[in-house]
Image: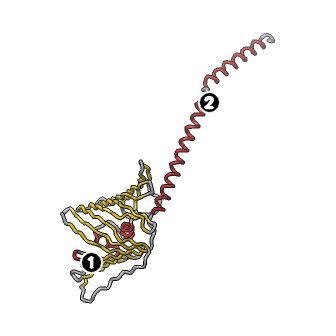
Amino acid sequence: MRRLLPIASLFAAIAGCQTARKVAQAVPVIDTEASKQLVVDSSKILQARADSIRKAAASILSIQASRIQYQTFSAKVKVDYLDSRDKALEFNAFIRIRRDSAIWASIVASLGVEAFRVLITPDSVRIMDKLEKTVKYAAGSELQEITQLPFDFNALQELIVGNPIGPATSPAALRHQDASILLAYEHGGFRHYLSYDATGPVLRTTRLDEIDPQRHRTAILSFDQFVVKSGRNFPNLRRITLSDKQKVDISLDFRQIDFDLPIGFPFSVPRNYKLK
């Protein structure tokens, strides 16, 4: 029996060595260099994501800072209108805005004759036809139907003053492409797509696509000929293309621009005017 003990111990030792070899074979050898590289690559990915987030946040802040701030605005605007039925109009408009309060316009036809006077507030629309001697009163909710433009009061004042249409909040999507910043929103029943020149940044184009498939109106706006006016980067030229039941092209050429001056909104209706 005593002779068998050393032999048993030898077998146990051999068995232990065999088990150790099997465990060693079962556990893969870790490539420390590859592991270090994996950590480095992961760190680069996380850093790239962090850089992208910081860049997007900086772009949003820069775009928000580029919005034109004002309390009042006034300008003379040369308007050219052309629709798909070849109806063409050319006239001058004198426009005044008190931010979030009122938009006033005097439409002057040929020979310097005032044809229309308009006063729009968030709650109402008033249109005086000085040629036909009539006046029309409507609710603010009817603005889009009256003007045949897909803009409510807020969008209209922003369009006139040269700001992007839509909320001044973080977009649903933002992408940098070459020297441009592209943004997307959903607001007011429309999908908004904005393109900025990254240097500035300067708003170049806006596209609005109506979400409602029954209507699906589209508006494309471009901004050009920027000038510095009272410390504000103002686009003198706007081009608007509207697609609905027909296509309409509108050009707005701004002149005599002023910010934050005292302004009035004269809208006195003569007694002999008829209610339309």
Circle 2: residue type: Thr
Residue closest to the far right: 2
The residue carrying pointer 2 sits among few (fewer than 14), some (14 to 19) or many (20 or more) residues within 10 Å by Cα, namely few
Q: Is residue 8 left or right of residue 241?
A: right
Q: Secondary structure at mark 1?
A: strand
Circle 1: residue type: Phe
Q: Position of residue 117 (x, y in %)?
A: 29, 78
Viewer-nearest residue: 116 or 1: 116
Q: Quadrant of the N terminus?
A: top right
Residue 36 to residue 184: above or below: above
Q: Confirm whether residue 131 shows in the render.
A: yes
Viewer-nearest residue: 230 or 14: 230
Whichever of callouts 1 and 2 sits on the residue coming sooner in the sequence is 2
Image-quadrant location for residue 100: bottom left
Q: Position of residue 80 (x, y in %)?
A: 26, 66
- Give the residue at mark 1: 116
Viewer-nearest residue: 57 or 9: 57
Q: Confirm whether residue 211 shows in the render.
A: no
Q: Position of residue 8 (x, y in %)?
A: 74, 14
Q: Position of residue 229 (x, y in %)?
A: 42, 67
Residue, x 61% and y 25% (percent of image)?
26
Residue, x 28% and y 61% (percent of image)?
241
- Tell me the number on the disc at residue 32: 2
- Tell me the number on the disc at residue 16: none
Image-quadrant location for residue 16: top right
Residue 152 to residue 35: above or below: below
Q: Quadrant of the C terminus?
A: bottom left
Residue 176 to residue 276: above or below: above
